[in-house]
Amino acid sequence: MTSPDDSRRNYVVLTISLVGAAVFIYAGIDKIRDPLQFADSIAAFAILPAVFINLLALALPPFEIACGLLLLPPATRPVGALAVAVISLVFFTALAFALLRGLTLDCGCFGTGAPSRPRMWLELALDAVLFSGALFVYLRSIKRLPARAVNTTQSRYD
Amino acid sequence: MTSAVSNVTASASRLPQSRGLGRQILRDLGGLALLAIASLVVGLVMNRLSAAPLPIVYQTPEQRFDAELTTLVAAPPFKISPAATVGLEEFRLAVASKGVLIFDARPSAFFENGHVPGALNLARDDFAQDYRRLAGVLQPAHDKPIIVYCSGGDCHDSRLVANALLSLGFSNVRVFSGGWEAWSAAGLPASTGSEQ
């Protein structure tokens, strides 16, 4: 039987998954519409060599949309959550690196705009929130079965 | 006794449990790698079908602009040089005087959302097309003062467009480096929609 704590946690997982899915699907659709602009945003970070920039600009939008969609059904949620956690960590690292180097750029994460450092800080915070949420969902999804198995073994001896 | 048995059982079950978790994480990482490969394939196919596909190797805005510029005239190789700039006050007076041609170098969607009154859209993205569209205004203006702006901050579309105009024979071209950001932050009037 599900305890009230468990069902509360399930609601939290569902809410985070829905919010994460909405954010990633929106971000992916926004980037897919203008890959050239997104490639320019990636280039502004001055991290990747030219040969990888367009490939990343083409692959990332479908990847983000797929991440969002995978977060929705419980069966695919662990892969979706892991993908969101990994990609948010990559975005976070790239943005933090750019901020430390004193760059002012439009990261292109959630639509395009004028290059702005306050917006970079905001997007850095959003990436941290997305990473934490996705990691929580992932750990919660993969811990569920083994934890139950331990409880069943224990209760047999009590 | 009961708790001792539970502890032993829990420790014993921890090993297969952690092995199971490890296997699950590896499986999910494998799924993630497949997802990345599938996304790259989808991206490449969509690019192939697109009306304006990206080349496989990235070209900087300067390289793209140079290529576009050569479609207009046999211009000398395009180089970025420090363009003369104007401050907000001088730009405001120039706009008020109506004796200066003002060009907005941002993409048309940004221009339509809000621009400096009287400005014309000469977007860096569609320079060749906009240049031809504005030929009637530009042809008699080779010696007229021109000021170009873009978003502001570190945007360099205005510098690219200003340098392109200089290399096309316009003699008095400057850049308002504060751009749209400084203009709107100062609460100065704005127009919306396409050019009047």
Image: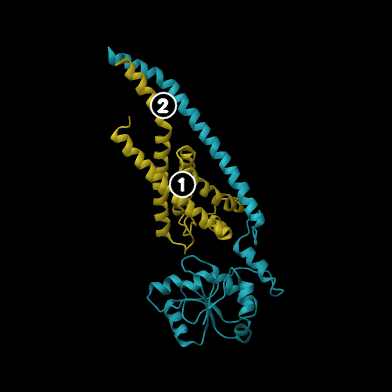
Chain colours: A yellow, B cyan
- Which residue type carries mark 2? Pro
Q: Earlier in the sequence, mark 1 or mark 2?
A: 1
Q: Is residue A44 above or below residue B174?
A: above
Check whether the beta carbons of the residues at disc 1 and disc 2 lie within 8 A of each other.
no
Residue lying at the far top in this picture: please name it: B1
User: Could you tell me which secondary element the residue under label 1 belongs to?
Assistant: helix
Q: Residues within 10 Å of mark 2 (few under 14, many from 20)?
A: some
The quarter of the rendered structure image containing the N terminus of chain A is top left
- Residue B161, horizontal then vertical, whole percent: 58, 72
Which residue carries the number 2 mark?
A146
Q: Position of residue B4 (x, y in %)?
A: 30, 14
Q: CA distance from mark 1 to mark 2?
A: 27 Å
**Which chain is indicated by disc 1?**
A
Determine whether, in the image, residue B10 is placed left or right of residue A31: left
Quadrant of residue B90 within the rendered picture? bottom left
Q: In the rendered image, is residue A122 in sight?
A: yes
Image quadrant where one finds the C terminus of chain A: top left
Label 1 sits on what residue type? Ser
Q: Give residue A88's mark.
A: 1
Residue that sits furthest to the right in the current view: B74
The vertical placement of A140 against A36, above or below, is above
